[in-house]
Amino acid sequence: MAAAPGDGLNETDTYREQVGSGVVRCWWAQRAPGEYVQRVVPDAAADVIVASTGAACLVGPTLAPALHQLPPGAELRGLRLRTEAIAAVLGLPGHEVRDAVVPLGAVLPDAAARTVAESVWRGAFPSALRPRPGDPRVRHAVSRIWRGAPLDSVADEVSLTGRQLRRLFTEHVGLGPKALQRIVRFQRFLRSADAVRPSSLADSAAAAGYADQAHLTRETRDLAGVTPTVLIRERHGLATPDVAGAVAVF
C-alpha cells in the first residue's frame, strides 16, 4: 500500500490509515496485491479517492454496502471527510452526494478536480477546496450522536424539532439523524469485531447497543450485505468477498 502522509499509521498488508484533523477524518492509502475485492460498509463520511493512474472519484455517504473490485497492483490514496463537514467542504448539498460514486470531474470544474487529485495524492489538503463555515448545530448534533446520545435529546439540545433536525442533516450531511445513529452503532460493533479476540456475537451486540443478536444480524445484513459471522471472517482475512456483484471503481 502506498504511504499516507505522516506517521501514526494503522497498518494491514493492503491498507494504511492516518487520523486527520479539522474537516479531515483521516488520510488513507491502499495497494491491491492482486485482483482484489473489497467490501465497503457505511461510515457516514465522504471520500475523495485518487488512483496512481491519475483517475479520481468522489464516494459520498450512504447506507448501502458495496463491493469494489481493484485491478492487480492498483494503488489508491484517499481523503476522508468528517460527517459534519461534507457539504461545507464540497460546496454541494449533502443530499446531492449521497450514494454517489462519480468521477471527481462530475462534481468539480475540470481544473479544480485535477488540483484536488494532485493534492490528495501528495497527502496535502487541496487548496481548491475552501471549506465554508459549517452549521454549529450540525457539528454539535453529529458529535452527540457519535457519542450515543438519544435523538430526542440531541434535537432538544440544538433547539430543533425532530423534523427540523432531519432537514438540516439532509442539507449538510446527506444522511438523516436516524441513519447516522444506525451507522454509529454498526461502527461500534465493527470495532469489537476487529479485536484480536472478538467477543461472542451476543456480547458484541449488547456492547454496541443492539437489542439482541437478531437485531445485530438484521442490521449487518442491511449495512454490510452479509451476516456478522461472514463479515468478521472477511475482516480477519479468513474469507474473501465473492467477486460476483463487485463494481470496478477505477
Image (tube, rainbow, N blue to C red):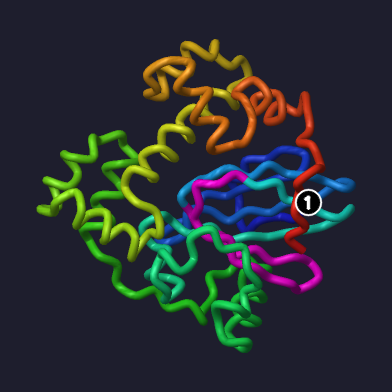
What kind of element bears circle 1? strand
Residue 182 position in % (x across, y down): 41, 37
Asked if residue 185 lies left or right of residue 109, the reply is left
Q: Choose between 187 and 101: the one closer to the eye.
A: 101
Asked if residue 150 lies left or right of residue 236, the reply is left
Q: Which quadrant of the view contains residue 149?
A: top left
Residue 180 position in % (x across, y down): 38, 45
Q: Residue at x 43, y 56 (%)?
A: 82
Number of on-image labels = 1
Q: Residue at x 76, y 36 (%)?
A: 241
Is 114 situated above or below 240?
below
The magenta segment? 45-65
Residue 217 position in % (x across, y down): 53, 23
Crowding at dot 1, Cα within 10 Å, few <14 / some 14-19 / many 20+, comes out as many
The amino acid on which the numbered mark 1 sits, given as a three-letter code, is Gln
- In which quadrant of the rendered image does the C terminus lie? bottom right
Residue 157 position in % (x across, y down): 13, 47
Q: Residue at x 44, y 40 (%)?
A: 183
Q: Residue at x 19, y 49 (%)?
A: 162
Q: Choose between 221 and 29: the one closer to the eye.
A: 221
Is 140 situated above or below 218?
below
Is 112 situated above or below 59?
below
Residue 15 on the magenta segment: no
Which residue in the structure is indicated by mark 1?
69
Asked if residue 70 lies left or right of residue 163, the reply is right
Q: Choose between 119 and 89: the one closer to the eye.
A: 89
Residue 50 on the magenta segment: yes
